[in-house]
Image: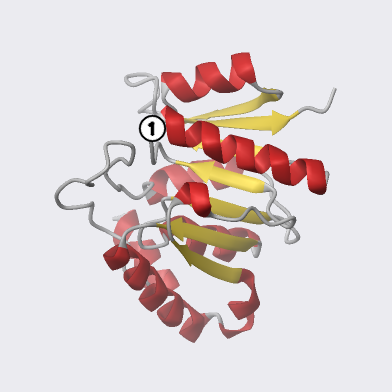
Amino acid sequence: MKEYYYDKLLNVKTSGDQKGFNESLHYHRYEPTPYSALEIFSSNYKMKRTDRMVDFGCGKGRLSFYVNYVYNASVVGVEMNDDFYHKAIANQNSYFQNFKNRRDKFQFYHGLAEDYPIDSADNRFYFFNPFSIQVFRIIINNILISVEKAERDIELILYYPSDDYIYFLENQTLFDLKEEVTLPGLSEHNPYERFLIYRLSYY
């Protein structure tokens, strides 16, 4: 029900999973974050209008539109799949019909996640298990290199986090677990049904 409600409210079409498989074993099948989970997340997690969220493996752009709608924050969707990228752009055009004053807060990048040039404005990064730990390591390294050039407050948001991601962040980086957002009715039966927020510590 929420899938229909929010897609209609935002004037977008983001439902449906990926058909078939990616050619690369490093990239996982696309599946949009459920709106019901995003509702719980946004009621617990604070963002400012000056923040910029990067969604790696954005698909049709659901997270980008939802985050912009709720927080009025800037968003960047990174997508390697041609079909999903073009659907995200089509959704963007539809979204702007209802939210004309938010055009300057959107960007969609077509290419591999590890090739996305981290901008000094990027300070929130979202991952719904989009790729292997090998690619994840590269992305985190890219973020850290960017921070060396422009120090700023950095947070990672992981939905349905893999054990590999968690182990890497907690044992091989300066990221500390800041917050956990559980999903009532789901987290009790599936420990992966949660959001983990990691904050970069400089000390």
- Left or right of 190: which side holds 22? left
Position above or below: 80 against 199 = below
User: Residue 153: x, y in percent?
Assistant: 78, 42
Q: Quadrant of the N terminus?
A: bottom left
**Visible in this render: residue 153?**
no
Which part of the image, by quadrant, shows the C terminus?
top right
Q: Depth check: 95 or 156 in front?
A: 156
- Amino acid at dot 1: Ser
Asked whether 178 or 148 is in front, the reply is 148
Residue ID at (41%, 74%): 89
- Estimate the x, y position of residue 40 in percent, counting from the top left: 50, 41
Colour setting: secondary structure
Image side of residue 135 versus residue 124, left or right: left
Residue at the far left in the pictured view: 20
Residue drawn 33% across and 37% down? 26
Indicate whether 143 appears above or below 48: above
For the image shown, how many numbered marks are present on the structure? Answer: 1
In the displayed structure, 70 sits above or below 34; it is below
The answer to whether residue 114 is seen in the rendering is yes
Image-based side of 61 in relation to 197, left or right:
left
Residue 52 x, y percent position in the rendering: 66, 57
Q: Residues within 10 Å of mark 1 (few under 14, many from 20)?
A: some
| Residue at image mark 1 | 132
Q: In which quadrant of the rendered view does residue 181 lie?
A: top right
